[in-house]
Image (cartoon, helix red, strand yellow):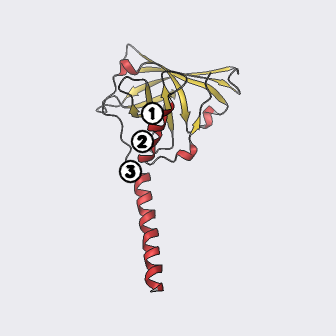
Amino acid sequence: MYKAHKLSRYLFTIIFIIMSNVVMSQTLQTVPHVDVKKYSGKWYEIASFPQRFQKGCHCTTAEYTLSEKGYLMVENRCNRGSINGKQSYIKGKAFVEGNSGNSKLKVQFFWPFRAKYWIIDLAGDYSYAVVSHPSKKYLWILSRTPKMDDTIYQQIIARLKEKGFDLSKLQLTQQI
């Protein structure tokens, strides 16, 4: 009896580990289609997995402008050190990947390097967006306004959990 109980605990543990790995390694899905003109404009970062290049950033924003050549101009800004800190700025380009419904982009801030930028959640009215990378190591929750309704935020969080994100790394971004 003891061996059977020990064996069942062992099997349960193995199944739990396998299922956890399946959830974490599931293929990240993007939204089916993004209207690039509607996506253009200013976005406020509500929360993110902090990245090295964002260290000390507050009031982070991203602005997308459709260029005549078909790519998006990207302008990222933040205040360094505090909400009243000196503004930091970087400009880049975002290129739509073919056959992605415009939901997969490659962002370039330094030539020749391009990073994957996948839109994985998007409000029907383009009031919020969630952006990541297929590795799930990067995550940004964006809003058209500096503050997001908590109910909407919690719904986004629930969907991110279902997609297997490690939300222990998620940090709210201070906005004015």
Q: Are marks 2 and 1 in contact (CB under 8 Å)?
A: yes
- Neighbor class of circle 2 (other Cα within 10 Å; few <14, some 14-19, many 20+) is few
**Looking at the picture, how far across and down is residue 85, in whole percent?**
70, 22
Depth check, front residue: 170 or 50: 170
15 over 87 or under it: above or below? below
| 2 vs 1, front mark | 2
Mark on residue 72?
none
In this rendering, is residue 163 above or below 120? below
Direction from residue 165 to residue 173 in the image, left or right:
right
Indicate which disc, 2 or 3, sits on the residue closer to the N terminus: 3
Q: Which mark is residue 159?
A: 2
Kindly state the secondary structure of the residue where label 1 is placed.
strand
The residue located at (51%, 48%) in the rendering is: 166
The total of numbered circles placed on residues is: 3
For label 3, the SS is loop
In 3D space, how far apart are the residues under numbered discs 1 and 3 (Cα atoms)?
Answer: 17 Å
The residue that appears at 41% across and 47% down in the rendered structure is: 162
